[in-house]
Amino acid sequence: MSSLASCIFCKIIKGEIPCFKLIETETVLAFMDIGPIAKGHCLVIPKYHAAKLADLPEDQMGDILPALTKIAKASGYEDYNILQNNGRPAHQEVDHVHFHYIPKPAGAGDKAGLVVGWPIQGLSKEDIQKAYDELKGKL
Ligand code: 5GP
Ligand code: ZN
């Protein structure tokens, strides 16, 4: 896990590394992704340094969805994904919370935009009930 001092996104927030800035509020920054998987791929990040979503204080989250929605409307793509990865096995490379806005260009198929695996587990109703009971009990 990168600390605040070495975090690449904290450096972008501080202006130590340049970015193509789209939106800035008191708590949020949006900018173009440097390794896009589709034209228009960009990132929305909280200015608060937290590695994973569950580490981010709720009072730092308020501007994230409005920024993503603004970008989705402005980009003009009919189809797109919002992606937020947490942990290496879950494809997180930068340990500062970030939300991807990823256009899915018409007809791109697997050539551009997000390509998703969806390994349905075939769990029974009882298995789902058990998972529900465990989670609901902790909320
Ligand atoms: P993750 O896999 O962690 O969800 O995605 C990290 C994203 O950050 C990648 O899409 C990558 O291209 C982007 N990225 C990594 N370093 C930089 C950088 O220095 N500047 C910008 N604009 N994007 C970056
Ligand atoms: Zn950071």
Image: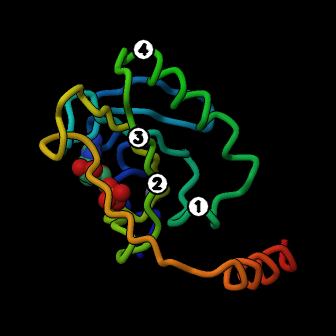
Between tags 1 and 2, which lies in front? 2
Tell whether label 4 touches label 3 (CB within 8 Å).
no
Mark 3 vs ligand 1: CB below 8 Å: no
Asked whether disc 1 touches disc 2, contact meaning CB atoms under 8 Å apart, the reply is yes
Can residue 15 be seen in the rendering of this structure? Answer: yes
Mark 2 closeness class: few <14, some 14–19, many ≥20 residues within 10 Å? some
Figure check: 76 above or below 58: above
Q: Is mark 2 within 8 Å of ligand 1?
A: yes
Question: Where's ligand 2: which quadrant?
Answer: bottom left
Label of residue 74 in the image:
4
Q: Amino acid at mark 2?
A: Gln
Amino acid type, label 3: Asn
In terms of depth relative to the viewer, which is nearer, 84 or 11?
Answer: 84
Looking at the rendering, which quadrant does residue 14 occupy?
top left
Circle 3: element type:
strand
- Residue 81: assigned label: 3
Which callout, 1 or 2, points at the residue further toward the start of the chain?
A: 1
Q: Measure the C-alpha gap from mark 1 to mark 3.
A: 18 Å
Q: Is mark 4 within 8 Å of ligand 1?
A: no
Q: If you read the primary sequence from the N terminus, does the residue marked by circle 1 or circle 4 appear first?
A: 1
Residue 101, x across and y down, in percent: 39, 37
Q: CA distance from mark 1 to mark 2?
A: 8 Å
Residue 6 showing in the rendered view: no
* Distance between the alpha carbons at the discs numbered 1 and 4: 25 Å
- The disc label shown at residue 84, or none: 2
Badge 3 crowding class, 10 Å Cα cut-off, few under 14, some 14 to 19, many 20 or more, is some
Q: Amino acid at mark 4?
A: Ala
Which of 116 and 90 lies nearest the eye of the viewer?
A: 116
The residue sitting at 76% across, 79% down in the picture is: 129
Mark 1 = which residue?
A: 53
